[in-house]
Image (cartoon, rainbow, N blue to C red):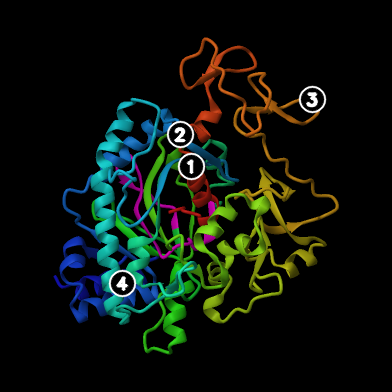
Amino acid sequence: MKLSCLLASSWMLAVQAEVLVPARLSFAELMNDGDSSSSSSSLLKVLQEVGMVSITHIPQFPKHQALNAIPGCIQESQATVSEMYADGTVRRSLGTQWTGVDAHDESGHVTMMNHGSDAQDCQVLEDQLATLRTTASTIAKAFAQVLVQSLHLEGTPLLLDHQDPTKTFSLVDIINQGDHIEHFHAYESSSSSTSEESSSARTIEWHVDQGLFLIFTPGMIQNEATDGFWVRLADGSERMVEFDASQDDMVILLGDGVDQYVNAKLLGEKTAARPLRAVPHALTMPSATIEHPRVWYGRMVLPPPSAQHPLYEDLSYGALKEAMAAPQDAGDAALSLGCSSTMRVLAGHEAGNETDDDGCGDKEFPCWHRCMNITEGETATDCENQGLELLCVTQVDEQRFLWDNTHNAIFFPGCANSNSTPVYVTPCPAGQVKNANDECECANGHEIDEDGGCGHDHGDCEEGEIKDASGHCVKDPSSSAFGMNGNGLTMMMVGLASALFMVSA
């Protein structure tokens, strides 16, 4: 079947159904038919109207083997980082980042995570990574070529080099030389997060991912595709995507980069091409995750570190990322990187929404260092009618709390009283507990060191363990968050991508 027919039939089904069935394109067609004008036209239409396409029938693709190894490896790996969401869902992640479409270290070998464990699941995961990454790289390169041909962007400069004004980056250059951030996620729900009251609550709110696009395997539980992944269409309607684990091998989801430097070029040069569509999406955790984790793999494609940000001519993408890694020291430019065109899309940019003086659109609100979409029913007017104010808040059970000025993804715009609503108290870092003075101190009795950790005196415990306040050997929480044997940059990028770039499919 020709690509144009396949995409057209999938798109018709998506429009007619209550759920969105993704337009599907086989791996062979992506690789072989990209130079067909009818094929490129069909794919381009999908990317302009929806912004997402599923790549199917990838040969010898170890999707199930790799994803099935994630929970066990994450449990044992010292490279694991964890994050809890407002609905009680816990996401545990492994991740790496590198520059260039292919994952290599300085020796030319494939980048590997330093698990500090010989767990069998970690070995299985690493064994499958080479194929998984090679496949993602192949898809990224082929997809870039199709976009270049469809949009007539051959050799067209999209970004300037911050250090060398004579150097530019084309679409292909951005992918081939850009930063690639890779994540493995395992989501688990508690009984409270899957209660009847919270079953419809979003685990991750509406957002658009930073980067040019995200390549990911749809979430699975026990080899079955899961529900809960939502997209917002151009007409404002919200649809849950119906993935098929037997078909949907890897999905391409367009990100904010298409607005920042692709659409900007198309509109700036007044070409006939319609702009591509970055996809607003959200995640609601399936109830099944209380028994088995929802597992997911994804890779985000960000611009080269030396590329100049189009909105901030004095800063490169690399410098902005470094600044955002330490938000207390970051300037306005760095903190707004995650809410430039990204959040204007969420706030109604597609309908011509304007930007307010605070840097956010008139349907969005600044919250935890970014612009966030205002929820229906909780606009400034709605809050005022209740005698409340629109503030940056979080909610635990039925109690709302005000933002405590930390960089934390649990906060969102909502109605509250600035005088009577208590301020949220961010829990102590891993390995620390509150003392009688409501201050954080090390659970193992050690002094907090200059890096904010609790030391690594294991006493009689096994490697990777410490003694808790009761003298029992437990897994060292600080090792889980930062224990990558010196590979701190990698985990900094993992946390940065999780919090600011919102890898959340």
Q: CA distance from mark 2 to mark 3?
A: 33 Å
Give the number of the disc on residue 484. Answer: 2
Which residue position holds label 3?
436
Type of the residue with mark 1: Met
Q: Is residue 243 visible?
A: yes
Front disc: 2 or 3 = 2
Compared across the picture, whether 284 is left or right of 110 comes to right
441 up-or-down from 110: above or below: above
Compared across the picture, whether 148 is left or right of 444 comes to left
Q: Residue 473: percent from the left, percent from the top?
A: 53, 15
Q: CA distance from mark 1 to mark 2?
A: 8 Å
Residue 221 found in image quarter: top left
Which residue position holds label 4?
11
6 up-or-down from 407: above or below: below
Type of the residue with mark 2: Met
Please report contact status of discs 1 and 2: CB closer than 8 Å, yes or no: yes
Image quadrant in which the N terminus is located: bottom left
Upstream in sequence: badge 4 or badge 3: 4
Which residue position holds label 1?
491
